[in-house]
Amino acid sequence: MKAYVYGANGAAIADVPKPAPKATQVLVRVRACGLNRADLGMTKGHAHGSAGGVGTVLGMEWAGEIAEVGPEAKGIKVGDKVMGSGGAAFAEYALADHGRLFRTPSNMNFEEAATLPVALATMHNAVVTNGALQPGQSVLIQGASSGVGLMALQIAKLKGAKTVIGSSTDATRRGRLKEFGADLAVDSSDPGWVDQVLQATGGEGVDLIVDQVSGKVANQNLAATKVKGRIVNVGRLGGTHADFNFDLHAARRIHYIGVTFRTRSIEEIREIFAEVRKDIWPAVESRKLQLPIDKVFAFEDIAKAFEHMEANRHLGKIVVTL
């Protein structure tokens, strides 16, 4: 089968053996894939958790149809339309655990479905499960113009947040955040953004920050968080190391929570997918929760799709079709 593989000379389309499902796995005939920031690093040879290196089939998000079912897979059958996440997504066929799938709603095409699995699972877990957002509270989404960031804004609004704030360093994208639920959009590269957040929250700060930036904004986040508030560290686009004001952290008694899928067991991931289905799936089916598609590329043009992502001018998801 055709797949997008990182090889000795970089990432390229290559022929690889078609995988076979074992135990609780299913084999999916992939019809569309969503690109994510971690994929961009892996096209340059960077590791993402245990994945990466020469011979790696890239990608982590897809939509398609069940082609084969492993002997222990339950609740799914050949022909079902599904979307999900897992390794080796950029290929004609991909394997997934039976608990790491969502059934694709009948009102959604493959391209639309491929935008959702990572964003839904990541941000429901960050905003609701770990962030413990309650109706009437305030939330700041750092890096809100990314696909997962836009989903976080929408989930926060869906769950009854009183004040939803999103950050983006790009003026055009910042201007569009209100379309996705933001009451206020701030520029995290502007030193005055903390004051804007404090002003919007009566001087107290937000109850919750979902942080995809980290690095240089870490101490500003502490200053923008309410006493006894929460910060959920989802991403590190601004750097993995930075100065950290431990005294401010303690003084504001902030719960600082780190999350990643890279160290989660399959049982934990199944539970995350189950929580999405239980809590917010009606909003997915009604299209209240959805992501814009910035551009669609054919599989043979997948390298161009990554060039488009690296240019960093898009809003929403970049999708590749097979």
Image (cartoon, helix red, strand yellow):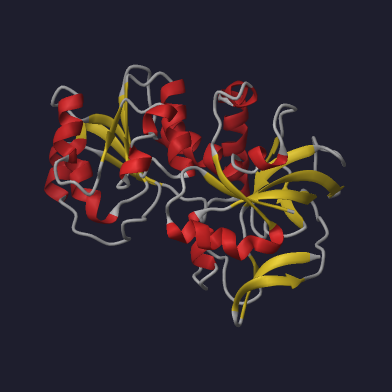
Residue name at image x 30 percent, y 52 percent? 214
Give the left or right position of residue 159, taking residue 217 as reference. right
Please, is residue 151 above or below residue 70 in the view? above
224 and 303: which is toward the camera: 303
- Where's residue 188, x and y in %? 25, 45
Residue name at image x 61 percent, y 37 percent? 273
Give the left or right position of residue 294, taking residue 302 as reference. left
- Where's residue 237, x and y in %? 36, 56
Could you say which quadrant of the image residue 164 lies in?
A: top left
Could you say which quadrant of the image residue 192 lies in?
A: top left
Please, is residue 121 above or below residue 261 in the view? above
73 and 103: which is toward the camera: 103
Residue 210 seen in this snapshot: no
Please, is residue 285 above or below residue 147 in the view? above
Quarter of the image with the C terminus in it: bottom right
- Where's residue 217, x and y in %? 23, 50
Residue 94 seen in this snapshot: yes
